[in-house]
Amino acid sequence: MLARMSVLPDPAELDALAGRIERHAATARDRASGLAAAVAAARWRGLAADACDLQVHVLVAALRSAADRLEGAAAALRRHAAKVRAIVADVAALGQDGAHVLHDLVHDPGALVGDVAHLAGDGIDLVDDALSMVGL
């Protein structure tokens, strides 16, 4: 099991999770709107109605706030997935250019300078994206 585990999460899974979180946010927002509409349509009057309206107002505000926080979490997860994708692409480019260096070392030594430059650029991109992922 551990041999198949990646150091980085799967960006597609992160995006799928963000989608589920966004659907929960939409559900919370819909329930808030539905509750507010139902209470407004009831036309209930009196002291008990005023107390109920106050409680409903608090609940609706809490549901909308929760929806906002869920949407923020989903957006953060999507940003993280994009950073993971960038790192995966950097590692793939580093591997590909490393293979070119090894190939040219044997078959085309004249191309080594360009290949090493690409390899160094890939390494710099990888470090830059990794530092970005941790907030540096």
Image (cartoon, helix red, strand yellow):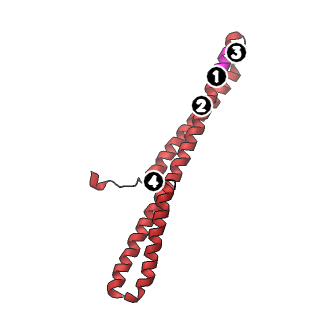
Q: Position of residue 72 (x, y in %)?
A: 57, 43
Indicate the secondary structure of the residue bearing disc 4: helix
Instruction: Find the magenta span and give its range.
Output: 51-55
In whole angstroms, how far apart are the C-alphas of marks 3 and 1?
10 Å
- Say few, some or many: other residues with alpha carbon within 10 Å of mark 3 (under 14 / 14 to 19 / 20 or more): few
Whole-angstrom CA distance, mark 2 to mark 4, is 28 Å
What kind of element bears circle 3?
A: helix
- Element marked by disc 2: helix
- Cα separation between marks 1 and 2: 10 Å
Residue 75 falls within the magenta-colored stretch:
no
Disc nearer the start of the sequence (2/4): 4
Amino acid type of disc 1?
A: Val
Residues 33 and 1: in front is 1
In the image, residue 53 lies in the stretch drawn in magenta: yes
Position above or below: 48 against 88: above
- In depth, the one of 1 and 12 nearer the eye is 1
Residue type marked 4: Ala
Quadrant housing residue 46? top right
User: Badge 3 is on which residue?
Assistant: 50
User: To which residue does mark 2 refer?
Assistant: 63
Q: Residue at x 51, y 57 (%)?
A: 132
* Residue at x 42% of width, y 79% of height: 116
Horizontal and vertical percent position of residue 44? 70, 15
Q: Secondary structure at mark 1?
A: helix
Label 4 to label 3: alpha-carbon separation: 48 Å
How far is mark 1 from mark 4, CA to CA? Answer: 38 Å
